[in-house]
Amino acid sequence: MKVDIDKIVEILKKSDEPRSEFVNLMEEFKNPYLVLIACILSLRTNDRTTYPATLRMLKLGKTPDEISRCSTEELSKAIYPVGFYANKAKQIIQLSKEIVEMGKVPDTIDELIKFNGVGRKTANLVLAKGFQIPAICVDVHVHRISNRLGYVKTKNPEETEFALRKILPKKYWLDINTLLVTHGQNICKPIKPLCDKCPITDFCNKII
C-alpha cells in the first residue's frame, strides 16, 4: 500500500492526542539557544524527567551569557536526575561560552554539529524549532513510525533523515517531529502499538 503522507499529516494535525509538557515547551521557545540546551537535556531521558529539569535550568539563566557563568555543580544540581547530568552540565556551560564568543547560535547543521555532543538530531531540532528553518529532526519515534508506516525502509535515524529529505514534502518538515513524537508517545508505541485506537491505521502498512 502506498503511504498517503498528506492524509496522515492532516489526520494527526487534527488529532486530540495530548502532547507532553516538554514537547509543548519546545514548541513555545522559538529561541535557538533554549531549544539547543533543552534538547541536550532530553537526550536519553524521558520527557517527564526532562520537563521539570529544563524549568529548573531556566531559573539559572535563559541566555548563553547567564548559563556560561554557572558552576558545573550548580547546573548539575538543577538538571538532576536527567541522564548523564554531570556531563551535560559541563557540556552546556562550555557550549554557552563558545556561543558567547561567537555572538550567536549557528543556523546551519554543519556548524551546530561542531559543538561537543551535538548530533544531527539536535541540530535539526534547533533549525526547525529555534530558527523556523525547514529541517527534519529524526528521533526514535520519527524513525520507528516512518518505517512502520512503510514510508521509508531504513536501519537508523540518520538514514531515515536523509530518506525523508528526498520524499517528505518540505511543507511538513517543521511539523513532522512534533506530530510523530506525540503519536509515538500516545498510540504508536514501540511494543504493542495501539492500532485499534490509531486514527491513521487505515493508512499504515504496519511493518514491525
Image (cartoon, grey):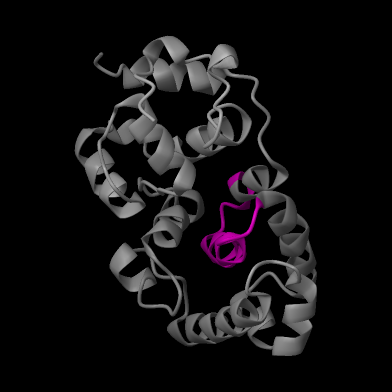
Whether residue 2 sits left or right of residue 70 in the image: it is left
Q: Quadrant of residue 149?
A: top left
Which part of the image, by quadrant, shows the N terminus?
A: top left
| x and y, in percent, of residue 206 in the image | 39, 22
Specify whether residue 161 is in view.
Answer: yes
Which part of the image, by quadrant, shows the C terminus?
A: top left
Query: In percent of the image, x 52 and y 37: which residue is there?
Result: 190
Whether residue 128 sits left or right of residue 64 in the image: it is left
Name the residue furthest top: 202
Q: Is residue 37 magenta?
A: yes
Whether residue 120 sits left or right of residue 87 in the image: it is left
Whether residue 123 sits left or right of residue 168 in the image: it is right
Start-end of magenta stretch: 27-46
Q: Quadrant of residue 106?
A: bottom left
* 54 or 195, nearer to the observer: 195
Specify whether residue 174 is in view.
Answer: no
